[in-house]
Amino acid sequence: MDTALRRVAFILLACFTLLFAQLNRLQVYQAEDLANHPANTRTVLRDFDRQRADIISSDGVLLATSTEAEQGSFRWQREYPQGELYAHTVGYLGFTTGADGMERSHHDALVGRTSSQQLVDLSNILNPDTGPGSIVATLDHGLQDTARRALGNRQGSVVALDPSTGAIRAMWSWPSFDPNLLSDPDSSVSTSTYTELLNAEANPLRSRAYRESLAPGSTFKVITAAAALEAGAVTLTSPVFEATDGYVAPLTSHKIQNFGGRTCGGNLVDLLVRSCNGPFAQLAAEELGPAVMINQAEAAGFNSVPPVDLPAPIESSYPVDYGKELQTPNPDNPAGLYENTPVLAQTAIGQNEVRATPLQMALLISGIANDGIIPTPHVLQAIQTHTGQTIAENSPGPWRQAMRPETAADLREALIAAATDGGGATAAVNGLVVGAKTGTAEVGDGSASSHAWIVAFAGPPDGPPQLAVAVLVEATEGSGDQTGGRVAGPIARALFEEFFTE
């Protein structure tokens, strides 16, 4: 009997220990993740029926506000004067639909729960505040609207950053949606709209800028170039690669052809200007090897979730498994040989299993523009009182060091050449120093369609780059074999023209 009781006691103790550990995991270690998870609406709904702070753009345009409801059981409702334009950044707030965008990620600031706001409230006990104030977004209204007009009704996205601070100046994805319908006090309207959007083929609720990743194509060559420069395998002027129409990696008979079957070669600048596939594939497969390529991709942010202050961003991915080592790296074969060396060659040109979000590619080009330092991307600029007094500013600082300053300087020089004589010339603007790399990524489903990319930076002749841009126009039915230079480049140029003529 005593033995049986001891067994029961032991089992109960073990169950209690497991329960205690699980509660601590949920309440302590995973509390922040659970609170910020898109499916968790409890925090937002707790404060739903109250006046929230306005959200305004960096140039003073009203993006979100609270108004008194004319019907229903709630006193307050959220309105979005700009409609679909900021749906994926400012987001929405509805009782049945929950919240997304800044409405979710900056909920505490919007309801006055940050420490700086509470200190102001304490100081105003005898002179109470007359409203919740506002939060200022980094978004530039003119630039955001330009992104929408330039992309038009083509599926894709545009991201524009300040390369030195990481402030997101524009982030637009199409298709979008009207957040006012999701915040409608009539639950039948908000619920039916949400269901319709969720079931739509292109899923307009999902921001394609930071929640969708696709093959980056030749824009990824800037990472391969950075890896080669960092490893000392190349300089801007040497070696000079023989002109060929493509490259056949070891262990395969499949040729990686240059775009359009053309013949090209030359030094690193020539390769970037003409976007030669073969030499970049050869660099990765025969000179750099998996470890160097993986390290450089991850230094630039791949395989990590970018720390943007918006809900549920996804990571961009670079493959890390190249199979069994068949030959150890040596002076005659610096890269070594692996079972999947042919795959490594494909990744060097942004194909195979390489996937990137437009946000990640904007961060990559920001790092090149910013002496190798990738800034922390963010949409919150400041918190203000109802009188316009700034009580908190958001300056999150660097995210990571992607490369040495010397490497970044070399890449800027090469990309400026690519925006002068290469495919990036469609992004060039008179009077500005523009650097760009285009990309045309094959879909791989047997169709003739391709994704059109460009990453670019621009600035005045007498100063550093002030804007970094990534544009993706996705392959869709009927889009044809579109190229980055022809399709994405003019969108980047429109952003530069808008930004530098304000």
Image: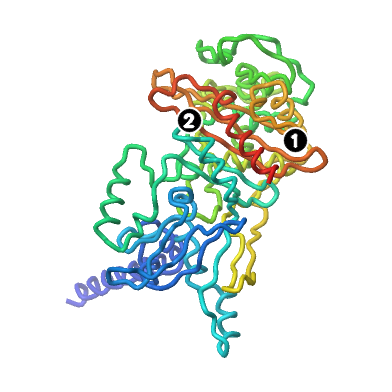
For disc 1, the marked residue is: 432
Q: Earlier in the sequence, mark 1 or mark 2?
A: 2
Q: Secondary structure at mark 2?
A: loop
Residue type, numbered disc 2: Glu
Give above or below for 92 relative to 264: below
Viewer-side residue, 330 vs 192: 192
Is disc 2 surrounded by few (<14), some (14 to 19) or many (20+) residues within 10 Å?
A: some
Residue 214 screen position, x and y as percent? 47, 33
Amino acid type for the residue under numbered disc 1: Leu
Residue situated furthest front in the rendering: 70
Above/below status of 352 relative to 299: above
Q: Residue at x 45, y 32 (%)?
A: 154
Asked if 220 appears above or below 87 in the picture, the reply is above
Question: Mark 2 — residue?
Answer: 353
Point out which mark residue 260 bears.
Answer: none
Specify the quadrant that holds the N terminus.
bottom left
Give the CA separation, mark 1 to mark 2.
Answer: 35 Å
* x then y, percent, for residue 309: 53, 56
Query: Which quadrant of the figure has residue 129?
Result: bottom right
Residue depicted at x 70% and y 49%: 164
Q: Is residue 441 left or right of residue 235?
A: left
In the image, residue 448 lies at what x, y percent? 43, 18
As drawn, 421 above or below 116: above
Q: Is residue 401 left or right of residue 347?
A: right
Residue in the image at 57% along x and 85% along y? 122
Under circle 1, the secondary element is loop
Q: Residue furthest bottom?
A: 126
